[in-house]
Amino acid sequence: MTTTHSLDPVNAKISARDVSIYYGDKRAIDEVSIDIPTEYVTAFIGPSGCGKSTFLRALNRMNDTIAGARVEGEITLDGEDIYKSGMDVVQLRARVGMVFQKPNPFPKSIYENIAYGPRIHGLAGSKADLDGIVEKSLKRAGLWEEVKDRLTESGTALSGGQQQRLCIARAIAVDPEVILMDEPCSALDPIATARIEELIHELKGRYAIVIVTHSMQQAARVSQRTAFFHLGKMVEYGKTSDIFTNPREERTKDYITGRYG
Ligand SMILES: Nc1ncnc2c1ncn2[C@@H]1O[C@H](COP(=O)(O)OP(=O)(O)OP(=O)(O)O)[C@@H](O)[C@H]1O
C-alpha cells in the first residue's frame, strides 16, 4: 500500500496506475500509482536499486530500448495511454524530454546540438526561426551568455555543468511538456550543481519536472512533491515538506533520518 498525504487538487500531466516493470522475470517496480502535476517539481528518492530510474524511464518509454524490459499497468500523458499501439514514440520523447546523469551532448557544434531536434520535428520554417529557437532555448537554460559567441564550437568542449545545461536546452528546444531528469547533478561539482538547481527553479511551472536524486538535500531544495521508493514500491508520496518533516511511514522516516541508504 502506498501512503499518500492529502494533496492540493492538481491537474495530472502524467498518471501511472498499477505500474509494474520487469527485467526478464525480475520485478523492479511493483504496482506503482502516481499523478504528476505540471505545477511542481516532483522528486523521486530512495535507496540505490529501489527502481527510481526504472520508473522514470517508463514515463517516456525509454525502457523500450532495454532488451527484456516490460511494463504492465497504465501510464497516461494528458489522459492518453502512452503504451497504446500506434503511439509515436519519437513524438512522445519530444513531449517528455529526458536529461541523463552524465551530460551527453552530440559530438557536434553547440548550435547543432540545439537545432537538431527542432529541425527533425519540423518546428522551424526558416533559418531565422531556427536561430530564434536556438537562442531562446539557450537563454532558458541559462547558457546563452556563456556560448553566444562560440555557437560553432563543439558541445563536448564545454565544462560538465555547461554540457548539462546544453542538454537541458536541447530538451527545451522541441517544446516539451515534461522534463525527466535522472540524477542530473551527480557528475557535477557543487557550483555547477547549484546552477542546475537554480535552473530547475526557473523552469518550474512551465514544464512538469521529475527529478531522480540521491541527495535528500537536493530533493528538499528543488521539489514541491516527493515520492519515496523502496524495494520497487512507492512507499509514500506527498508534499516535500511533509515527507521530510512529518513522514507517515516508518520506512520513509528511517530513510530520511539516514538509517539506511
Ligand atoms: N537494464 C537492466 N537489466 C536488468 N536489471 C536492471 C536493469 N536496470 C536496472 N535493473 C535492476 O532493477 C532494479 C532497479 O534499478 P534502478 O536503476 O531503477 O534503481 P535506482 O533506484 O534508480 O538505483 P540507483 O539509485 O542506484 O540508480 C535493480 O535491482 C537493478 O539491478
Image (spheres, rainbow, N blue to C red):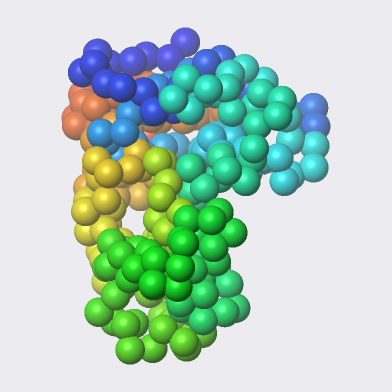
Q: Is residue 32 left or right of residue 14?
A: right
Viewer-proximal residue among 175 and 103? 175
Residue 255, x across and y down, in percent: 37, 34
Q: Nearer the viewer, residue 56 or 177?
A: 177
Q: Answer whether residue 201 is visible to the viewer in this image.
A: yes
Say which quadrant the C terminus sits in: top left
Q: Nearer the viewer, residue 25 or 129?
A: 129
Which residue does the image show at 52% across and 16% down from the upper left?
Answer: 17
- The number of discs equals 0
Task: Please tell me in which quadrant of the rendered image residue 30 appears.
Answer: top right
The answer to whether any part of residue 30 appears in the image is: no
In the image, taking residue 11 as reference, residue 228 lies left or right, namely: right
Residue 68, quarter of the rendered image: top right
Give x and y (percent) for residue 50.
54, 35
Q: Is residue 231 above or below residue 223?
A: above
> In the image, what residue occupies the spot 51% across and 81% down?
109
Q: Residue furthest top?
A: 1
- Relative to 97, is 133 above or below? below
In-image side of 53 versus 190 (left or right): right
Percent position of residue 146, x then y: 29, 81
For the point 37% across and 14% down, the residue is 3
Which residue, as the protein is rendered here, is positioned at the far front? Answer: 125
Query: Can you say whether 240 is above or below 80 in the image?
Result: below
Vertical side of 116 occupied by 49: above or below: above
Query: At 72% across and 46% down in the image, what residue appears?
Result: 65
Picture quadrant of residue 57: top right
